[in-house]
Amino acid sequence: MSKKPVRVAVTGAAGQIGYALLFRIASGEMLGKDQPVILQLLEIPDEKAQKALKGVMMELDDCAFPLLAGMEAHSDPMTAFKDTDYALLVGSRPRGPGMERAELLAINGAIFTAQGKALNAVASRNVKVLVVGNPANTNAYIAMKSAPDLPARNFTAMLRLDHNRALSQLAAKTGQPVASIKNLAVWGNHSPTMYADYRFATIDGASVKDMFNDHAWNKDVFLPTVGKRGAAIIEARGLSSAASAANAAIDHMRDWALGTGGAWVTMGVPSNGAYGIPKEVMFGYPVTCSGGDYQIVEGLPIDAFSQECINKTLAELQGEQDGVRHLL
Ligand code: NAD
Ligand code: LMR
């Protein structure tokens, strides 16, 4: 018997990431090849954006996806999020060359107050929310705080792109396939202060640190390459990452919904106090997923260098959080 369709809301549906994301959701790459979906698409009321959204929906129609059980265009989050089971909050301004993501807070922050309130009012009580729009951690924090009737742990921020970037850099450094690398973590903020941590990583079961323990490469090459990759892409493409961001959003939601089979992935989640991070700070942690839920990987040893990196990214997040008090 076929499964009951689930409702998937996507904001910024006519944007760059939206265009790389919707077709993959509708084809079953996010929630499984047996899971029909109803897409609830939100764009700003602006005539041009709504017209572009209609065009994207025409293309979705033209794919004749067997799993696409319905599709709606919205300009109001209160209707877009009605009964939604999954919400991918992408819609917001991307940064341009020379900007830092935190600079977007003044422009984008208010979007997430309104959308958090709308989720609180009309979404499924089990809705899984992924915030992609930058600065993703703090926007997710705003949405979470604006939705007091929903479980805080249902709000997450996207650090999966950083996780995937780190995997790819490690694969290049070691000459080993990405699929052979396990137990990587990215701590903290989706910003250059993030701490991509390969201390626990293994390749085909063998410790990466035992293969090479190159602090200079870690500090001067690996961390800056991963941390500043978004800016490097903006510099090269003239636009912020879109296909890789959509891919990371698919990975994040798929793993959260369907499980990781014990493997670690990185999600930005409200802290439960683990590793001394104050509760509710939306922090990148290594997690495992099963049964439609995630668990922070706890009890890992944190050495002095790692603690310094974690403190730095935490201080930045707390600064961002303080800066949005007026929105909460
Ligand atoms: P884009 O400008 O191409 O598209 C954004 C879309 O959002 C536009 O169509 C716009 O009309 C719409 N939008 C704006 N405000 C909205 C609102 N209140 N409700 C609904 N829709 C709204 O941008 P993009 O390249 O798709 O990037 C979207 C966001 O994702 C940016 O903030 C970008 O910085 C961020 N991003 C995050 C990551 C990450 O790893 N977390 C990666 C890449 C991009
Ligand atoms: C990225 O990491 O590619 C995105 O967050 C876009 C950006 O502004 O860097």
Image (cartoon, rainbow, N blue to C red):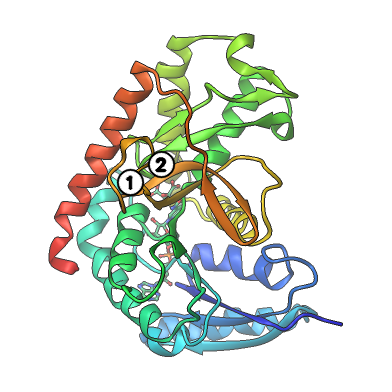
Estimate the x, y position of residue 322 in percent, counting from the top left: 15, 53
Q: Is 177 rendered above or below residue 73?
A: above
Q: Earlier in the sequence, mark 2 or mark 1?
A: 1
Residue visible at 44% across and 90% down? 79
Report the side of 63 relative to 272 (left or right).
right
Split into quadrants, the picture shows ligand 1 in the one at bottom left
266 with respect to 181 (left or right): left
Q: Name the residue at 36% across, 87% down.
A: 45
SS assignment at label 2: helix
Q: Residue at x 50, y 64 (%)?
A: 16
Secondary structure at badge 1 equals: loop
| Residue found at the very far right of the displayed protein | 1
* Marking on residue 53: none
The reply to whether the C-beta atoms of the residues labelled 2 and 1 are less than 8 Å apart is yes
- Disc 2: which residue: 235
Rendered view: 47 above or below 246: below
The quarter of the rendered structure image containing the N terminus is bottom right
Q: Note whether residue 295 is visible.
A: yes
- Indicate left or right for 15 with 184 as reference: left
Q: Is residue 76 visible?
A: no
Q: Which class describes the residues within 10 Å of circle 1: few (<14), some (14-19), or many (20+)?
A: some
- Say which quarter of the image contains residue 40: bottom right
From the image, tell me which residue sits under label 1. Answer: 97
| Ligand 2 is within 8 Å of the C-beta of the residue at disc 2 | no
Label 2 Cα neighbours within 10 Å, binned few <14 / some 14-19 / many ≥20? some
Amino acid at the residue labelled 1 = Pro
